[in-house]
Amino acid sequence: MDAGDWALLHRQGQRALSEGDYTTAAATLQKAMDAAENFPDTDGRKVAVAINLALSYKKLHHFEDAARYYQRGVDLARKDPNASPLNVAIILDNFGNLYDEQKKFAKAEPYHRQALAQFEKALPADDLDVIKCRANLAQAVEFTGKPEEAAGLYRQCIAALEKKGGDAEADLAITLDNYAGLLLRDKKPGEALAVRQRALELFQKTLGADHPEVGICLENLGQTYLALNKPDAAEPLLRRALQIGTSTFGEDSPALVTTLDALSSALEKLGKEEESTELAARAMKIRNHAGVQQPAAVTRP
């Protein structure tokens, strides 16, 4: 295999990743990474392969593999005398996201702060990378006991993304959905509902009805309706979320646990006790098999 072959694999893996086909992305990018190790990194592409491979593994909840390739990306970027400091900042921010996914926010926060400091030195305040990093920091600081700082960061990001429009709509959807989570945890379900409804519209507009990100937002919107004691509104959303999640991750993935639990709760409140019990048992079986003590937080890159 020559350099052109692994570059082609990289492009194919990137396409699968953007389409939400994380299994194909991981397999393809792993081949690209293995092949790339035999060639010098003359244009920083090897770093990009490492980051995309790490992200694919993260999406599949293969956290140890993801951490290994994020670290590989950091090592490659720091060894390259021609590499931009922004490359390291991007990897640090993504490394923080890996800990976010595992609810290890105290570990995530310093990665995001380091990344944001580098981004702000090198880029305008309204640059998309700066905004996304600021939003990632917002999530981490909320869960390390700084909800007021987090809310301010989210509102700053939302205002900047609304001004950008167009290509920034997907990032706006993610930021809105995560901000709604903060509002819900702050006992403001009515405000959270309006924000999440807008987020879902943007996700479906930019990604299509069956994308995994849409599944996450559907679950979150369903959880919001449950907080408002509206299980009848939550049920169809959670069923769609479970369908998308099962298609993406498989029948027995730990990624389905929170959706199963939420749908079980909605059905119990609607008097559909038999199906509710079946779903709760399925969630418990997955949790026990995977060693999952509590559902993982829903986070994004």
Image (cartoon, rainbow, N blue to C red):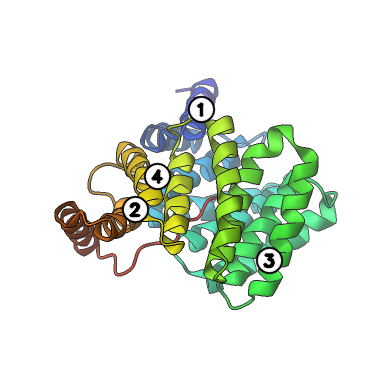
Residue 158 on image: x %, y %: 72, 51
Amino acid residing under circle 2: Thr
> Which residue corresponds to the image point at 17% horizontal and 57% vertical from the top-left?
273
Viewer-nearest of discs 2 and 1: 2
Disc 2 from disc 3: Cα separation: 26 Å
Which circle marks residue 151 in the picture? 3
The residue at 60%/38% (across/down) is: 202
Quadrant of the image containing the N terminus: top left
Q: Residues within 10 Å of mark 3 (few under 14, many from 20)?
A: many
Q: CA distance from mark 3 to mark 4?
A: 26 Å
Task: Give whichever of discs 2 and 1 has the lower sequence position.
Answer: 1
Quarter-wise, where is residue 166 in the image? top right
Q: Position of residue 82 (x, y in %)?
A: 75, 43
Please state which of the two labelled residues, at mark 4 or mark 1, is closer to the viewer. Answer: 4
Type of amino acid under label 3: Ala
Q: Which residue is mark 2?
A: 259
Residue 82 visible: no
Q: Where is 143 relative to 99, above or below? A: below
N-terminal-most mark, 4 or 1: 1
Looking at the image, tell me whether mark 3 or mark 1 is earlier in sequence order.
1
Q: Is residue 286 left or right of residue 112?
A: left
Mark number for residue 237? Answer: 4
